[in-house]
Amino acid sequence: MKNALAILVAATTKSARSITMTTISTTERSFTCSDGVKLAVKCWSNSNGGSKPEHTQKILCLHGWLDNAASFNRLAPLLLDSSSPLSDKQQQQQSMEIVALDFPGHGLSGHKSVDGPPQLLAEVTYYVLECIEALEWGEGNNGESSSSGGGGGGGGGGTRTVVGNIHANANTNNSSQGNNNGGDIIKNDKISNEITGNNERENKINLIGHSMGAGVSVVLVAAFPELFASVTLLEGAGPLARNAKDCSRHVRAACQRRLKSNKTLFPDRTNGANAADGTNIMAAARAKVYRSVDAAIEARLDTTRRMPGDQYLSIEAARDMVLRATVEAAGAAATSNVSEDDNSRPVTFRHDPRLQWPSLQYYTREQVEAFYSDVCDSNVPVLILMAEDGWPVDSWSQSAVNDLLKPCHMKLLKGSHHFHADPDTVGDVAAEIVTFLKA
């Protein structure tokens, strides 16, 4: 259902603050992945009442663990203000479309199947690619050559090959006879970028990832650099890294938790049936019932207080995410949002309870370093924004980011872990992103 809103959006650039009348359309969409899992997205787009724009700037937002697309409710409209990222001339030529994805098991998206626990970060990366394909974003079908022989998503306009840690785009029209030793790479990225210039970048995706979404973003850009024009990392700079020597402990903890919890989550699934059709596993999870939406919001705030460091969350941001994350207790399998008018009714959280299990496998530090190096080598610009009262960062992560990821710009802003969602701090976050996208 499309809801067109004519709103006043204040530009938050450092140089000036202007007020521009912009029509912002908000749309809820969903689609079914190839494996049957349903994904939900929230979309924002703008128009200035003129002719159809020549280009549309695409922004894909990825949320944090146990958050959802509503965490971008305040950031998206600020980015959409046409006077912020674009000049007066560009306003007539370019529009912006922002899509925030609910990861599987979060928000309005479905849950993974019974035999597919959702804790592996690379699995989340796969579903982002499903989302990009469903949106028909990213030319060349994730790096494959187009059927018409035209330019693909990468700079070379052909299939993308990976040899070791080096990415290249090989033209499929070039003959490989007599030179098929698997070690030769056509390094045409620099030349192609000089030829195609900004036109190619305008067809690519600007990625914004928060917390866990920042980790997914780094993995995505490292593996599929040809799809992205830029990446902004909010309160996170990559996948969670663990000591390789602890791998057996991780397997033990994950298996023990799964053995214990499956008996409660799936008491009637002894015949091997699964929920691959996207139905919510929480229908059988006996989820905790909260007496009202306000009680669920308070639980969400309390969870933030127990996080590492001095984290806090505004009640406004908590309400946004809780309304998208809950259903009426009597209808736990429902798919519609809880309304603010339903405060007197008991609710439960709709998220997949398995998201709280320990992961079967974490990336090692060596693997995270490889991701950082690949992103750096891809030349995709990186912006990192951290909060003063955000998630604590260890010294190894700081060094790895500085030495290997080498972001274009890194800044510490006021606020806490959800500074992009809290009304008091989202303006500064938006201003930094706007400046970055203009560069």
Image (tube, rainbow, N blue to C red):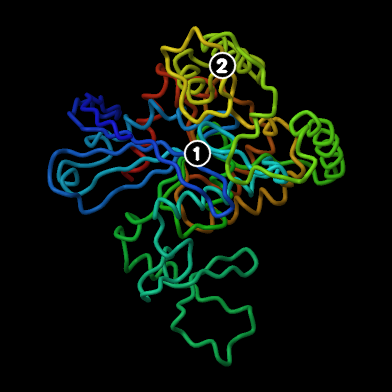
Q: Is residue 261 above or below residue 116?
A: above
Residue lying at 34% horizontally and 56% vertically, measured from the top left: 203
Q: Earlier in the sequence, mark 2 or mark 1?
A: 1
* Rendered position, 39 above or below 107: below
Please identify the residue farthest to the bottom as the structure is shown: 178
Task: Name which residue lies at 60% across and 18% down.
Answer: 304
Q: Which residue is mark 2?
A: 347
**Point 56% across, 23% down: residue:** 331
Can residue 308 be seen by looking at this rendering?
A: no
Which one is in front, 29 or 299?
29
Rendered location of residue 197, percent (x, y)? 31, 62
Figure quadrant of the C terminus: top left
Q: Amino acid at mark 2?
A: Val
With 247 as the anchor, is 388 left or right in this view?
Answer: left
Residue type indicated by callout 1: Leu
Judging by the rendered image, the residue that carries numbered circle 1 is: 62
Which quadrant of the figure contains the N terminus?
Answer: top left
Q: Secondary structure at mark 2?
A: strand
Residue 430 location in percent, x, y? 37, 30
**Closer mark to the observer between disc 2 and disc 1:** 2
